[in-house]
Structure formats: C-alpha cells, structure tokens
Image: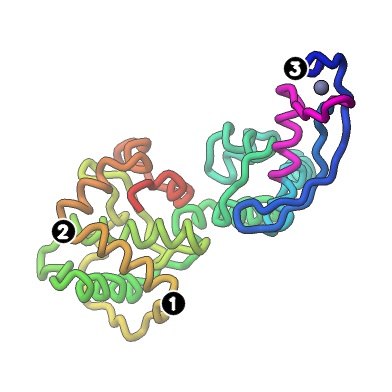
Amino acid sequence: MDCPNEHGRMELKGMARDLPFRGKRVKFRARHYVCPVCGMEADDLDLAAENQKALSDAYRRAAKLLTGEQIVQGRKKLDWTQEDLAGAANVGIASVKRWETGQIQTKAMDDILRRVLAGKTTASDVYTGNRPLSLARIKLVLERFSGLLGRKLLKAPADKMLYAAKYLWYADMVAFRETGQSMTGATYAALPRGPQLNNYSDLVDFIREADEGQAEPLTEQEERILVRIARVFPGNQAVYRAAHKGQAFMNRKNGELIPYTDAESITAM
Ligand SMILES: [Zn+2]
C-alpha cells in the first residue's frame, strides 16, 4: 500500500493497543500500514478485518466470553461443522460464522454456547430458558405485574391469557437475554394471536390456583425488568401489538415453539 501523501510504500507494522471498549480495558496487537515519512496509518480490507477480530477477541477474553478461536476449537473437538453447532444452539449458521470470525455474542448466548459445547444442554433448555417450569413463579410474576399496572391480569374463570401471556413472554425473554435464565421456565409457542404459553389451556387453572408464596422470590434484577416492562406497556393493546408484531415472533411458523435464543431479536425492550 502506498502513502496517500505520495511518500511511496508504507511498511506493515505491529503495534500494541490499549483502549476502552464497551466498558472494558482492552489490550491487543493490531497491524497497520505505516508511512515511514509522515507516520500516516492505514489498513486495507483484510487488515481491517484482522484488527477487528483481534479487538473482538481481546474484549471477549476481558469479558470472559468465548473467543472466536475457542468456539472453533470447541466445535472441532466434538467433530462438528458450523451447521452442527448452529443446530445444537438453535441459531442460524450465519450467527456461528459471525461469532467465529469476530462478532461478539451476548452473555446469554455465550452461556448457551458453553453448555452446548460441553454437551450439557438438552433441546428443552432452549425452550425453558435454563429454568424448570414453575407455575408458582408464573403466578408470582403475574401478581407483580398486576400490582405495577394497577389492574388484574388474570381474569377468572375463563381467561385465555391472551394479554397475560404477552407480559409473561416479555418478562421471560428479557430476563433470559439479560441474566441467562428465564423467570418462569415457561415454554412459548407462536400462535395466530402472538406468542402464547405452550399448552396454556391445560395450565391456566393450575396457574390461577398456584401458591405464589411457594415460588423462589424475584431477584432485584428481575424486579427491575418487570418495572421496565410495565412502564413500556401500560395497556393490554400495547403489549399485544408489540409481541404480535415482534420479529422474534414473526419468524416462527404457526404452532412452532419459540426458542429463548430469539430473545436476541426483541427490540421493544
Ligand atoms: Zn506519508
């Protein structure tokens, strides 16, 4: 590469970088073309990609996330293709390719990748958000929403949970994305009127009769998530429209179970 200031050929040089990135101090080696005359630095496309990957991996080491190389090695140890890993983690193959070449995965996704690569995950984890189903906790979350919204969410006796399920869906999905675990362990299906508790018609009476006092208490982080959701969606129509039109929901076929990995694409919260 030649210097844009017409000083002739630039030299390829490695240099130590130490910079703040996403709230972490990140140290890595970058390579740039440098003009020996004026000191101008430049990257071609390959070098830019290489430096981006070095930054991303340094950040992932600092944030205790799997690096691209660790994902590749973990997969090869299992003799898996990128497609095998994508299938096991319930994501698209394009996502696997991006993480391996430098895109930074979220903490929740990193947890899933680690579990999958360690052979510790079962398909159901992806549909329960790494928590066993707790009807008492569903009741607890709905009661808390009722308190925050100032109205009852579960109406007796023939409530079909059309709106209650949307609030639960946001609580579970956002909790999964931010803590790596759902709040209630509920499984959701894509139904014509939006995400719904799987088998809700069998569950709704048991939820109504469940004793929320038996549920594991909400953590402060979970409590804050519920407050945010109640603030963004004060009314049933707002939560219904957002959940019903959300990308995570629209991508699923009617009746299909919705994996918690879809939480990545929830934009309303
Ligand atoms: Zn120059």
**Hey, which quadrant is residue 50 in on the image?**
top right
Label 2 secondary element: loop
Name the spot of residue 127 as percent of width and height, x first: 45, 54
Name the spot of residue 191 as percent of width and height, x first: 26, 44
Judging by the rendered image, the residue that carries numbered circle 2 is: 235
Residue at point 31% right, 44% down?
190
Is mark 3 in CB contact (under 8 Å) with mark 2? Answer: no
Q: Which is in the foreground here, disc 1 or disc 3? A: 3
Taking the magenta stretch, the answer to whether it contains residue 181 is no
Judging by the rendered image, the residue that carries numbered circle 1 is: 219
Does 81 sit above or below residue 144? above
Judging by the rendered image, the residue that carries numbered circle 3 is: 4
Residue at point 20% right, 44% down?
193
Q: Which amino acid lies under the numbered mark 3 shown in the image of this protein?
A: Pro
Q: Give the Cα distance between marks 3 and 2.
A: 58 Å
Does 188 sit above or below residue 137? above
- Earlier in the chain: of badge 1 and badge 2, it is 1
Q: Which amino acid lies under the numbered mark 1 shown in the image of this protein?
A: Thr
Taking the magenta stretch, the answer to whether it contains residue 55 is yes
Where does the magenta region start and end? 35-56
- Residue 118 visible to an observer of this rendering: yes
Is mark 1 in CB contact (under 8 Å) with mark 2? Answer: no
